[in-house]
Amino acid sequence: MNFAIIAAGEGSRLANEGVAKPKPLVELGGTPVIERLIRIFERQNAESISIVINGQQPETLAFLKSVECACKLNIVVKSTPSSMHSFHALSSLLRNGKFCLTTVDTLFKEEEFARYIKAFEEYKGDGMMAVTDYIDDEKPLYVATDEELRITAFLDTPADDTRFISGGIYGLGTKALDILDRCMAEGVHRMRNFQRSLVDSGMKLKAFPMGKIIDIDHAEDIAKAEIFIAGK
């Protein structure tokens, strides 16, 4: 399977709060978050790992060029207006079967991620999204499902029976990339609107519940992430 990482954001909130390093290079337990993902993907037998990074962050590019990787490491340098546009910048590298895409600051337990990847590899539908019932996000994307965890909608506000939010881990295939191309041509913005287009197009998407999934948006999140990764 191929893997991909969106790491093209400016990280302006972290910078404004005094964090000197670009977000991909923020360290948890002494390891930059981007390297943590690379190593996890390697252990899932990645055929390739494709990463899009911000053109205004030469430190990130220099670091990635120094990383030794057991699989092919593709680096795309492009400043983009949204995560959906960043995804599209990687899409030509992902047209070879199933792939898993995450954002660079998506933090999860590796053993849960391994179970997710196994389930996604075995799933016969069009895609599998990791979801969580842990909500610690300023603008969460709620995921509506039926009793069999088939995804029926992506919502900005929760419905009465909505249990999950998006975990920022996307398991998809070539069919989704065709829809992504269409979204770009139609001027669609934001990853959540692309995901709505997947549902509207009739794709068979399933939710995979994981435990806590967190991300790093603010300086105070780094300490919380350290505790989470350490398992305390």
Image: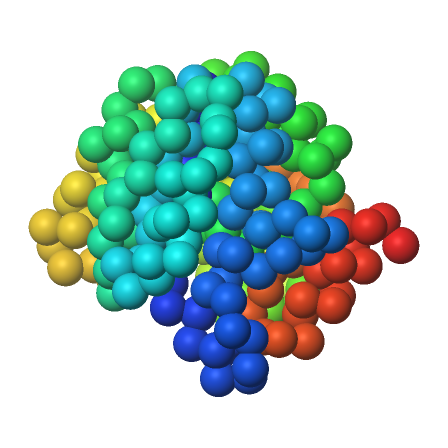
In the image, farthest residue toward the left: 185
In the rendered structure, the answer to whether residue 26 lies left or right of residue 177 reads right
Can you say whether 173 is above or below 231 in the image? Answer: above
In the rendered structure, the answer to whether residue 153 lies left or right of residue 195 reads right
Q: Quadrant of residue 126?
A: top left
In the rendered structure, the answer to whether residue 119 lies left or right of residue 75 reads right
Q: Residue at x 75, y 66 (%)?
A: 224
Can you say whether 54 is above or below 146 in the image? Answer: below
In the rendered structure, the answer to whether residue 229 lies left or right of residue 219 reads right
Quadrant (top left/top right/bottom left/bottom right) for the N terminus: top left
Q: Residue at x 89, y 54 (%)?
A: 232
Q: Position of residue 91 (x, y in %)?
A: 25, 36
Q: Position of residue 228 (x, y in %)?
A: 78, 55
Q: Residue at x 15, y 44 (%)?
A: 182
Q: Nearer the viewer, residue 115 or 127?
A: 115
Q: Position of residue 51 (x, y in %)?
A: 37, 41
Q: Position of residue 52 (x, y in %)?
A: 33, 47
Q: Quadrant of residue 118?
A: top right
Q: Nearer the viewer, residue 166 or 87?
A: 87
Residue 133 visible to an observer of this rendering: no
Q: How is the image coloured?
A: rainbow
Q: Nearer the viewer, residue 161 or 163?
A: 163
Q: Residue at x 49, y 55 (%)?
A: 24
